Amino acid sequence: MIIDITEIQDIHFFFRLESFNEVYRIIWVFAPIFILVFGITISVLAIVWLEREISAGIQQRIGPEYTGPFGVLQALADGTKLLFKENLIPSRGDIRLFSIGPSISVISIIISYSVIPFGYNFVLSDLSIGVFLWIAISSIAPIGLLMSGYGSNNKYSFLGGLRAAAQSISYEIPLTLCVLSISLLSNSLSTVDIVDAQSKYGFWGWNLWRQPMGFVVFLISSLAECERLPFDLPEAEEELVAGYQTEYSGIKFGLFYIASYLNLLISSLFVTVLYLGGSNISIPYIFVSDFFEINKTYGVFVTIIGIFITLAKTYFLLFVSITTRWTLPRLRIDQLLNLGWKFLLPISLGNLLLTTSSQLFSL
């Protein structure tokens, strides 16, 4: 059988084209993940810089100013310093738990970003149980803290890990009940559907106005989940040296540092999605809606505007959280647990009961 040279060239071209298509598919699968991770990294650096500037303003002092313009590279310099520091391991601690703990805390938080709708049709994974996925995965982070505290073979670290577990359990229940109320109003657990349900009625359709009690409870519970002042009992310097971080140094200490800001960012994003309409600006609603209808063909432009709106709301909530940290004193452990079990839990249960009743009567 004689094969023409042209046919052989066509066969080779076909195989090259198929291999190119396979590479293109692989790149297309991983490109959104890389973009999301890059955006999260830049956001964490920006939050660290903002916190230092805001705290300096509140305390009437000069913040970072020498590392880069306006000190914007200070967080990058600190991360580089931690990267090259010596990684110390306790001689009598559990090395496996000690090493795995920080990774569990960071990975469990990063996975939660996959269900956040940053803009119009701009979400990594639109799951039907997106909100509960965040709650379930965020419950794993305190396990990493408990493992770190136990593996350190230090009484202060172990107490910090126990406090982190107790605090997480205390405030996850009101948080979940508030999410249930939102899902009842939206008839869905998907974050995309929740944003769409709020965008139907414009500015006054935000769940902030329909669930004011739930918004306050959710905000307080999310701050407690992030272990931010006045709820930073697991790492209280005056009582526990540095809590579960006491024996850590180098990159492992840096992972805890990153995890705290990742958790703060994801909490603010979920407050934006659940209560502030997500990427919906709605001010004034009619003109913005008409403007988007005119530019419906330019999907990229609408997506960029949506991302900008979502991040603007998120950074406003971050400003509130940072200001709260440098304004309010720390609670005692009994006050913290009493606030969760005796106040926020009954309020969130009552809010869920009112929401369920209103939905039943509206049928």
Image (cartoon, rainbow, N blue to C red):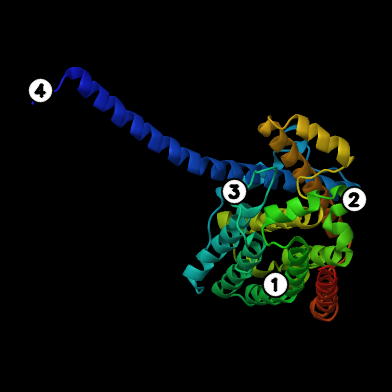
Q: Check the image and report above or below for 288 versus 33.
A: above
> Which label belongs to residue 168?
1
**Numbered label attached to residue 20:** none
Comparing 268 with 86, the one in front is 268
Marks 4 and 1, the one that precedes in the sequence: 4
Q: Residue 58 carries which label?
A: 2
- Left or right: 102 as drawn, with respect to 359: left
Is 310 placed above or below 205 here?
Answer: above
| Residue tagged 3 | 124
Answer with the quarter of the image where residue 207 lies: bottom right
Name the front one of labels 3 and 4: 4
Q: Local crowd at mark 1 within 10 Å, few (<14), some, or many (≥20)?
A: many
Q: Is residue 46 left or right of residue 158?
A: right
Residue 166, quarter of picture: bottom right
Query: Callout 3, which amino acid?
Result: Leu
Q: Mark 4 points at which residue?
A: 2
Instruction: Describe the element under mark 1 as helix, strand or loop.
Output: helix
Residue at point 69%, 58% (across, down): 263
**Coordinates of residue 343 in the picture (x, y in percent):** 86, 77
